[in-house]
Image (tube, grey):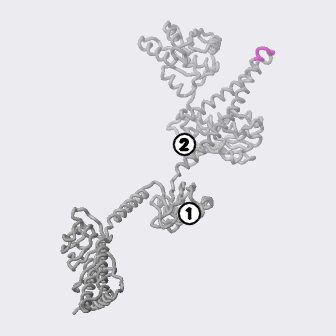
């Protein structure tokens, strides 16, 4: 016989004895606790009472009262059993239902009569049947420590999730049975699934969020971070949880952030901007926002976000720098305008004063007054040329020629302008051309001369003793020019500043040296347009060296330096010429007429291109002087029309010379393209005008 059977019988005998004693107690008027009895125990108890009553035969009314009490207790137990909030089953090894309460009937949607004798698996979803049978086997083997959740279907087809928990037992006949409790957990499971779905959505949103997100305790120790936080800090795989959020803060910001971090419990939202260090290198600006959250169970935590504001901070910094640069530029331009006013008014004062003295002063001073006016006018013209050059350089509209020229001749030409001034100051002026410098190179000798004149002019201005040397040598495949002086030098903090437009070392009203502050800015721009770089070195009180490099391009064949054809000396006797002058400004027109008639030439003047075209049609002109900008018809249009009609009629070619205030190289090219033969920018000297006219028509 199996040990389990023996154990079951022993339990049966023990139960029978206990129930017998209970029956006697009932018969004797005692009230034992009947609510813990199983359904089968009631029947046995009644049987024992009947036996006891048979033995006692018919006892008194107290015994009958006790019997009634037992029957009432049984009814009460049956009610408790049937209407318990949990479904109760008694199943055999095959899972057939032998007992069932009404709650279980409601769970399965059938009556007690329909369910008794029916296998419970008929109501279990097919995919759960195997799991249930395994669980049932564990119950009968005494190995089921906890219940399982399965899906059951009612008679109407609705599905429910139930928790089944069973214990082994025996029926009244000692046959092993399973006492099974079934609890409807559908609502709980759906709530859990909804919660899990919500948590999954939150986690999806959190992981996909462009914000770094984290949860930490009041001490700042992480309990959770999202992927974006890991990207900001470079700490992955739980490393952020090990380090804590404050370990990622930039050292320069840590003290401030930790000082402001709220201590203990707080109700308000806390925010701070700081830098985060990336483990792989680099840093980013973030805006931290932290708020308290109270979880179930009274646990308090802090959730926060970290918004990457690097772009915004960079934009703010760029804006701040731009604002500072704009203020500096505005200040520099204000200083420039004040200086420009001084530089313009000074020669204008000389010119106007000299003209006034010419009219009222003694004749013996006329030559000196004319020299002063001419010198001041040249200074004023140079100022205008500087402004125009700077404007063209900034607009990248300056054209650079690529023609052969002699290096030594270009350097000597620039030095020759300053030899007298240097000699007056007792400063030596030397030229040092290295032996490896080619005699001729390809480039723009006019622009090279302009740069050298600016640099040598500054050296002469700021040098009171010693020497100035202009050197040229070949360095690393390029031609390097250097201007060295022993002058006052430049403070180190202002050395780079002097290359900015409108800037001077001393912009104050008490400055010792004049100038517009454009010379070095123009020189640097010209050098860069020629493919080089201008730089300066200086020691205050000892002198300066300004050097620049140019591409070394040697012409294939030796050629004469390019330039305007030399002006021919005016002939003692000239032929009579009939000249048509088109000029809209009456004072300029009157002055040009005076210059031409002083030469003995006949002049007819008009004020626009349309009238110039009408006069030309009449014929008899040897040459036309044409302004470019005029009302009704400009000079370029008039020149094109004249050339077109000459071609159509087969008439003689009449030379046209542009006489214009449009002084750019591209203006010259545009005039020549319109059919003009030459181009003279205003103001033009009398000698140059004579030379150009006679070059076009001959003596």
As rendered, which of 309 and 453 lies closer to the eye? 309
Instruction: Tell me: 169 left or right of 461.
Output: left
As rendered, which of 637 and 143 lies closer to the eye? 143
Instruction: Tell me: 502 left or right of 45.
Output: right
Q: Residue at x 50, y 6 (%)?
A: 618
Residue 537 placed where, x, y %?
Answer: 67, 47
Instruction: Tell me: 163 left or right of 644.
Output: left
Q: Which residue is mark 2?
A: 552
The label shown at residue 246 is: 1
How far apart, in angstroms, are the residues tagged by discs 2 and 1?
59 Å
Residue 524 placed where, x, y %?
Answer: 61, 40
Q: Quadrant of residue 439?
A: top right
Q: Is residue 89 above or below residue 415?
A: below
Q: Residues within 10 Å of mark 1 (few under 14, many from 20)?
A: some
The magenta region covers 356-362
Which quarter of the rendered picture does the C terminus lie within? top right
């Amino acid at each position: 016989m199996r040990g389990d059977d023996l154990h079951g019988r022993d339990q049966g005998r023990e139960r029978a004895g206990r129930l017998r004693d209970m029956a006697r107690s009932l018969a004797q008027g005692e009230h034992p606790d009947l609510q813990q009895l199983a359904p089968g125990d009631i029947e046995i108890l009644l049987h024992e009472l009947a036996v006891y009553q048979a033995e006692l035969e018919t006892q008194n009314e107290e015994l009958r009262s006790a019997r009634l009490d037992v029957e009432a207790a049984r009814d009460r137990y049956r009610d408790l059993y049937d209407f318990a909030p949990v479904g109760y089953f008694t199943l055999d090894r095959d899972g057939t239902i032998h007992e069932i309460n009404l709650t279980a009937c409601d769970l399965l949607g059938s009556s007690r009569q329909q369910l008794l004798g029916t296998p419970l698996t008929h109501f279990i979803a097919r995919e759960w049947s195997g799991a249930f049978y395994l669980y049932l086997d564990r119950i009968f083997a005494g190995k089921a420590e906890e219940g399982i959740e399965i899906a059951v279907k009612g008679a109407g087809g609705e599905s429910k999730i139930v928790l089944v928990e069973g214990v082994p037992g025996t029926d009244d006949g000692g046959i092993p049975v399973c006492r099974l409790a079934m609890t409807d957990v559908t609502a709980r499971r759906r709530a859990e699934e909804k919660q899990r779905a919500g948590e999954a959505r939150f986690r999806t949103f959190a992981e996909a969020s462009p914000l770094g997100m984290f949860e930490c305790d009041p001490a700042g120790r992480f309990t959770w971070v999202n992927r974006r936080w890991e990207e900001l800090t470079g700490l992955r795989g739980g490393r952020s949880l090990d380090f804590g959020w404050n370990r990622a803060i930039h050292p320069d910001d840590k003290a401030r952030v930790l000082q402001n971090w709220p201590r203990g419990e707080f109700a308000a939202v806390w925010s701070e901007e700081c830098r985060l260090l990336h483990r792989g290198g680099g840093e980013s600006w973030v805006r931290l926002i932290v708020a308290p959250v109270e979880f179930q169970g009274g646990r308090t935590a802090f959730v926060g976000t970290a918004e990457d504001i690097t772009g915004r901070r960079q934009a703010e910094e760029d804006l701040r720098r731009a604002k500072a640069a704009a203020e500096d530029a505005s200040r520099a331009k204000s200083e420039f305008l004040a200086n420009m006013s001084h530089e313009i008014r000074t020669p204008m004062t000389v010119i106007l004063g000299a003209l006034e003295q010419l009219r009222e002063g003694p004749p013996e001073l006329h030559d000196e007054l004319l020299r002063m006016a001419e010198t001041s006018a040249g200074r004023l013209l140079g100022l205008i040329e500087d402004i125009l050059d700077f404007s063209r350089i900034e607009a990248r509209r300056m054209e650079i020629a690529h023609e052969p020229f002699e290096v030594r001749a270009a350097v000597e030409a620039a030095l020759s302008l300053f030899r007298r001034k240097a000699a007056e100051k007792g400063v030596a002026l030397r030229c040092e051309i290295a032996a490896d410098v080619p005699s001729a190179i390809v480039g723009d000798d006019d622009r090279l001369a302009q740069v050298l004149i600016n640099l040598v002019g500054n050296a002469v201005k700021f040098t009171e003793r010693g020497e100035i040397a202009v050197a040229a040598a070949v360095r690393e495949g390029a031609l390097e020019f250097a201007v060295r002086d022993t002058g006052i030098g430049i403070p180190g903090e202002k050395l780079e500043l002097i290359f900015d437009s409108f800037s001077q070392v001393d912009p104050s009203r008490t400055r010792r040296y004049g100038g517009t502050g454009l010379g070095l800015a123009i020189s640097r721009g010209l050098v860069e347009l020629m493919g080089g770089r201008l730089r300066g070195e200086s020691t205050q009180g000892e002198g300066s060296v300004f050097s620049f490099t140019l591409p070394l391009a040697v012409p294939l064949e030796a050629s004469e330096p390019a330039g305007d054809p030399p002006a021919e000396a005016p002939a003692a006797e000239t032929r009579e010429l009939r000249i048509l002058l088109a000029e809209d400004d009456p004072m300029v027109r009157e002055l040009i007429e005076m210059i031409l008639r002083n030469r003995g030439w006949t002049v007819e003047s008009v004020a626009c291109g349309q009238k110039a075209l009408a006069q030309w049609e009449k014929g008899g002109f040897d040459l036309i002087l044409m302004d470019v900008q005029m009302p009704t018809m400009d000079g370029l249009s008039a020149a094109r029309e004249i050339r077109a009609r000459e071609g159509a009629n087969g008439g003689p070619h009449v030379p046209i010379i542009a006489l214009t205030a449009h002084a750019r190289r591209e203006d010259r090219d545009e005039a020549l393209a319109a059919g003009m033969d030459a181009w003279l920018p205003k103001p033009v000297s009398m000698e140059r005008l004579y030379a150009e006219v006679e070059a076009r028509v001959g003596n």
